[in-house]
Amino acid sequence: MGKRVFNNKMKFFKFFDKNDLGSIPRIFISSLILIFFFYSMPIFISFINKDNLEFQNNSKAVLAYTLNSKNNSAKEKTELLDEKDLLIDIFSLNELEVDTVRLNASTIKQLFEDTKYTLEDVREKKLVKPVALTLLPNEIKMIESTKKRKEFFIQIVLPLILKENNNIRIDRKRLFSIINKSNNSDLEKKWLAKKYKQYGIPSKDLSTLKIRMDEIPVSLALAQAAKETGWGTSRFALEGNALFGQWTWSGEGLRPKESDKNEGHKVMKFNVLQASVRAYQRNLNTHSSYIDFRKARAELRDNGKPLDSLVLAGYLDKYAETGDKYVEVLKKIIAQNSLKDFDDAKLLPSSIELESLI
C-alpha cells in the first residue's frame, strides 16, 4: 500500500513538470498535499478501528472489586471502600475454608442415600436435607445420563440457595420489625448501618433497603446456575466454584481460554460454593442493571403474590450479552426441569443449628 501511495505522489509531481509550473507553486501545492495526507490518516485509522470495538457487559461483574485485595494499591483501596463494605460478608465467607476437601461423586451420592435426600422426596414433602457441600465433584462431567447429572447438580446447589434465602428472610423480618417501631435501640441502629453498607445505600433510605433486601426465587437461581455452568461441568465451576459466571477485571479469577492474557475480564473465583451463591444474590440485589428486576419483585410482594421466576426472569436480559435469548433459555430450563417445584421448599436445620437452640 505504501508503494502505491508513493507512485501516486510521483504522478502528481510529473503533472506539475509537464505543465511547466514554477518551483514556488509546486512547493506550495506539494505542501498542501502532504499536510492533507498526514492530517487525514489518523481520522481514517480511527474510523476503521471502530468496527473492532468489543462490547462489554458489566452487569455480570458484581462490582469492580477483587477477592485478592492485598494486591490493591492505596488509591484502589480508597476507591473500593464502599464496595468492600458491600461485600464484607462475602469476603469473610470466602476466607472461612481455604483447604477444603473435594469429595468424589460416589461419596456424595452415598451421602445423599444415607441421609435419604432425593429430589422426588423434596417435590413431595417440600423439605430439603441440610447437606452443604463446599466443592463440586470433578466426576460430575463424566455422568453420562443427562437426567442423572441434572438431578445430581440440583441436589448439590439447592441447599446452598435455600440457605442464602433463609439468611435474607431472617434479615427482612428484623428489618420490618425495626420499621414498625417508633424508637430503635442502639443495637438496631448499628445493624441498620451495617445493612445499608451491605446493600450499597449511602442515603440510608429504608424503602430502598426494603426493596433490595429480598430473596431470589429458588427456581430462577437454579436455572441461572445450570445455564452458567452447563449443569456443573464448566471449568469455571470446577476450578473456581463459580456457579453464576460473575466477572472481575482485577484480582483473582479464571480467564476464558479464548481471551488475550493481558486483556478482558476474568470469571470470579471463590474458595467455596456458598460464597458464589451469596455474591450472585448480592449482585441481583444491588447492581444498577437489575433495578427493573427489583421493582417487579417489589410489586409482586405489594400485591401479595408469590415471587414468580418466569415473570422475574424477563428482567434479566442484561445478565448476558445475548439479552432476550438468554431470558428465553432461562424460562425453558425452569419449565422443562420443573424447577418451580422447589420454590416453596424449606431447608431443614443442620445439627449445629439445632445444638445452638438447645
Image: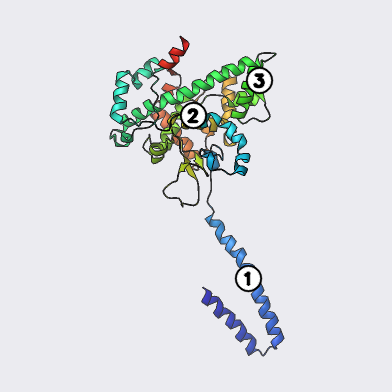
Q: Nearer the viewer, mark 1 or mark 2?
A: 2
- Counting other residues with Cα less than 10 Å from the Cα at mark 3, is it few (<14), some (14-19), or many (20 or more)? few
C-alpha gap between disc 1 and disc 2: 58 Å
Contact check, label 1 and label 2, Cβ < 8 Å: no
Mark nearer the N terminus (1 vs 2): 1
Badge 3 amino acid: Lys
Residue under label 1: 38
- Is residue 348 at all visible to an observer of this figure? no
* Amino acid type of the residue that numbered disc 1 sits on in the rendered structure: Phe
Can residue 201 be seen here? The reply is yes
Q: Quadrant of the C terminus?
A: top left
Disc 2 to disc 3, C-alpha distance: 24 Å
238 left or right of 145 in image:
right
Q: Nearer the viewer, residue 90 or 330?
A: 90
Q: Dot 1 surroundings within 10 Å: few (below 14), some, or many (20 or more)? A: few
Q: Which residue is mark 2?
A: 93
